[in-house]
């Protein structure tokens, strides 16, 4: 790939993950980038190396992996960016197993703490508490939200708003087998979010 094209992909993903208004599914990776600005970047060598060593989809995945890990620069200034990508890729391969295990973990906490619905709380719902506590995977919450749309209820919360934004922004990149996973575990999903069952629609 041309390094300048990598730069434009980077700009599009950065806008997508760090702003409310930009939606990569609507803009189709369109982002304005000036060649003069590109040539002055401190990470120019990184962009050139990405263009030289990786295909387009792999470049997108590397950047996405780093953005969702919490790096607002997408790994551009992180020596461990490729390691973050490898971990993300490995997690992706076992997503079905992780999703099932996380659902059971949520159910166990609900039973233990006598919680009726893990997506409803006057303050912070159990499912998001477990996400913030790294007890369940981000992908689990993304898939769960595709089935039971609950995340927008907490998008104005000062503590949860960044997490809610991340769940929404990551959603277009968590698509493989999502429908199958939801249908396979719909009973458990509806039990976890029992007061929201009627909001489920097949995706």
Image (cartoon, rainbow, N blue to C red):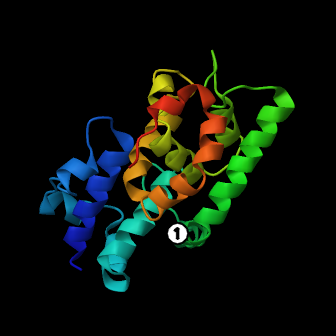
Q: Residue furthest bottom?
A: 53
Q: Nearer the viewer, residue 199 or 60?
A: 199
Image-based side of 89 in relation to 126, left or right: left
- Quadrant occupied by the N terminus: bottom left
Residue extending farthest to the right is: 112
Q: What is the x, y in percent for residue 114?
A: 81, 26
Image vertical order of residue 151 relative to residue 181, above or below: above
How many numbered marks does the figure carry? 1
The residue shown at (71%, 25%) is 116
For this rendering, which residue is in front, 59 or 187?
187
Q: Which residue is mark 1?
A: 85
Asked whether residue 15 appears in the rendered view, the answer is yes
- Quarter of the image for residue 40 reads bottom left
Picture coordinates of residue 71 (x, y %)?
Answer: 50, 52
Q: Nearer the viewer, residue 46 or 63?
A: 63
Q: Secondary structure at mark 1?
A: helix
Judge whether residue 75 can be spotted in this image. Answer: no
Residue nearest the viewer, comparing 144 with 64? 144
Give how far across and how far down residue 41 sits, in percent. 29, 61
**Which residue sits at x=63%, y=15%?**
122
* In the image, residue 10 above or below residue 70: below
Horizontal placement of 62 versus 114: left or right?
A: left
Residue 113 in percent (x, y) is at 83, 28
């Amino acid at each position: 790939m041309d390094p300048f094209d990598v730069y434009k992909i980077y700009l599009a993903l950065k806008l997508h993950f760090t702003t409310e208004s930009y939606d990569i599914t609507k803009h189709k990776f369109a982002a304005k980038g000036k060649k003069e600005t590109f040539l002055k970047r401190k990470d120019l060598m990184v962009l050139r190396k990405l263009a030289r060593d990786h295909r387009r989809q792999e470049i997108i995945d590397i950047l996405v992996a780093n953005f969702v890990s919490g790096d607002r620069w997408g790994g551009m200034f992180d020596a461990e960016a490729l390691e973050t990508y490898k971990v993300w890729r490995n997690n992706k391969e076992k997503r079905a197993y992780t999703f099932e295990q996380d659902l059971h973990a949520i159910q166990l906490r609900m039973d233990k703490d006598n919680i009726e619905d893990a997506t409803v709380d006057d303050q912070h719902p159990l499912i998001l508490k477990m996400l913030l506590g790294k007890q369940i995977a981000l992908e689990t919450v993304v898939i769960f939200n595709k089935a039971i749309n609950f995340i927008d209820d907490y998008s104005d919360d000062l503590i949860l708003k960044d997490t809610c934004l991340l769940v929404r922004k990551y959603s277009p990149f968590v698509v493989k087998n999502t429908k199958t996973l939801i249908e396979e575990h719909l009973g458990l999903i509806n039990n976890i979010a029992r007061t929201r069952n009627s909001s489920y629609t097949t995706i």
